[in-house]
Amino acid sequence: MTDQSAPLMLFNSLTRALEPFVPVHPGEARVYSCGPTVYNYPHIGNMRAYVFADVLGRTLSWKGYALTHVINITDVGHLTDDADAGEDKLEKAARANAQSIWDIARHYTQAYWADIDALGIRQPAHWSIATDYVPAMIEFAQSIADKHCYELPGGLYFDVSTVADYGKLARAATDEGEGRIEQVEGKRHQADFAIWRKTPPGETRQMEWDSPWGRGAPGWHLECSVMSGKLLGFPFDIHTGGIDHREIHHPNEIAQNQAFCCAGSLADPANSGARMWMHNNFLVERSGKMSKSSGEFLRLQLLIDKGYHPLAYRLMCLSAHYRSELEFSWEGLGAALTRLKRMVMAVVQLKERAEQGIDTSAWRSHAKLAPLVERFDAAISDDLNTAVALTVLDEAVALKKIDPALKLAAIAAFDSVLGLNLLTLDRTALRLRPKAATITEDEIAQRIAARHEARAAKDFARSDTLRDELAAQGVDAMDGDPLGWDWRLG
Ligand code: AMP
Ligand code: ZN
């Protein structure tokens, strides 16, 4: 067995089974991820979905596939309820803030991209913006309208009984109400959904387009079918999203894709538009701070303001399996930060010792590294078991009596999948000052230096005074810290 040859097994939500990844196009991997609805800042739970998609993409790259990843930006169509009820989230936000919808979309798209960067998530090949694809959505809808849709005063509706196996992904009944699906007079089945929503008479929306079914806006599910098919071609390899999308959004996308491609049954998953559908489980938080409607909700910036490096949050995500619920806690985040610091400091020391830099020539066949590569590969090939992969990384970091340049090569290779930026982070980057801190970095450095001098001169009284002064300002001086850290903000 060579070092990266474990078969890549992934959990397909459509078949509810672990399946080997077999690319549609040999040597390639085409992945579409449902992106954010840009009416507000993303919370850190949302960002878990993209950390997961990023690790999937990095794993496919590690396995040697040429990756094409698409993430969309939903700037139109997503209603306040995932089913058909409510109003467009962006229209609502624009009204509440008395701002143009385009400004709202631009602002929150930028904020989302900042979080993407901060979390070490690689840029996808395409960021597809929904409003750029409205003509394509109208064309798509026209091509399926006769056979699969019917018109009501409110718009064009998709008849879910016209495709085989509707709802297989959600395992939900087609016709029984879940209570969340909008009651619209004239709908043939409760699960039927709008693919075009007409602007009600007498109203104007900020975002509306002409269509054969009147002026209005596309349904949310339509956009992902259109953008994924256009950019990746049906069938593509993997479609990802959070587990909530398994219930309504993705079954509806699948129904549209079936209608567009062939109306074939889902016995062949490729008829769904993608061979595999993968879903990350939720990040949960007990006090309700994940909700965007609560005042101080859990944005990545809040973590940074409290002094936690964003990659500590990434590490926290990686320490759980993507299909398990992950409970957020500040203690858990603190533990992840400590673990990250330990790794980074070890790498900093290795870099100092490896005079020639990283040696990528023969590390894979090294007697101590080869078994680790094999175990790392087995872990990520086992449905992206990042928790185990991290322990293998820890073992690599802890290896003794080995050329630092070779060890660095192994760490860099593992980090190409985990994405913790271990080779570029350093102590300064990790030591974020909480926003609320009143003492400056320079003041801390001066007092720490004065304290070192006092200790060197065995003036312990002065050293203690300096320590107490720092403590009064919320800074813990750390003597003999195993990570070589000399202070932290308490
Ligand atoms: P949205 O912007 O609401 O469309 O959501 C963006 C992504 O975040 C989607 O893939 C959701 O399924 C996912 N998501 C929403 N809430 C959470 C959560 N608490 N944990 C993990 N993923 C989530
Ligand atoms: Zn989507």
Image (cartoon, rainbow, N blue to C red):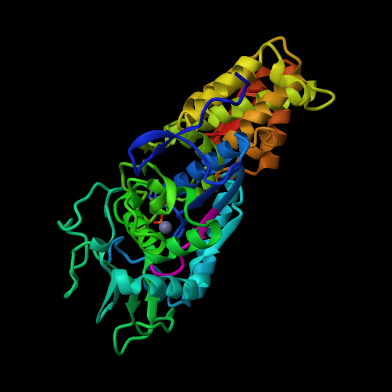
Q: Position of residue 173 (x, y in %)?
A: 19, 52
Query: Which residue sits at x=33%, y=40%?
Result: 15
Q: For the image shown, how many numbered marks are present on the structure?
A: 0
Query: Which residue sits at x=37%, y=80%?
Result: 216
Q: Is residue 304 visible?
A: yes
Residue 215 appears left or right of 349:
left
Q: Position of residue 398 (x, y in %)?
A: 62, 16
Query: Which residue sits at x=62%, y=19%?
Result: 396
User: In front: 277, or 461?
Assistant: 277
User: In front: 296, or 441?
Assistant: 296
Residue 408 appears left or right of 187:
right
Q: Would you say residue 74 sits in the magenta stretch?
A: yes
Q: Which quadrant of the rendered structure holds the N terminus?
A: top right
Compared with residue 406, is residue 216 higher up or lower down, i.e. above or below? below
Q: Position of residue 31 (x, y in %)?
A: 52, 49
Q: Quadrant of ligand 2?
A: bottom left
User: In front: 215, or 18?
Assistant: 18
Q: Would you say residue 75 sits in the magenta stretch?
A: yes
Give the residues drawn in magenta, as a range: 70-77
Q: Quadrant of residue 200?
A: bottom left
Q: Quadrant of residue 351?
A: top right
Residue 418 appears left or right of 180:
right
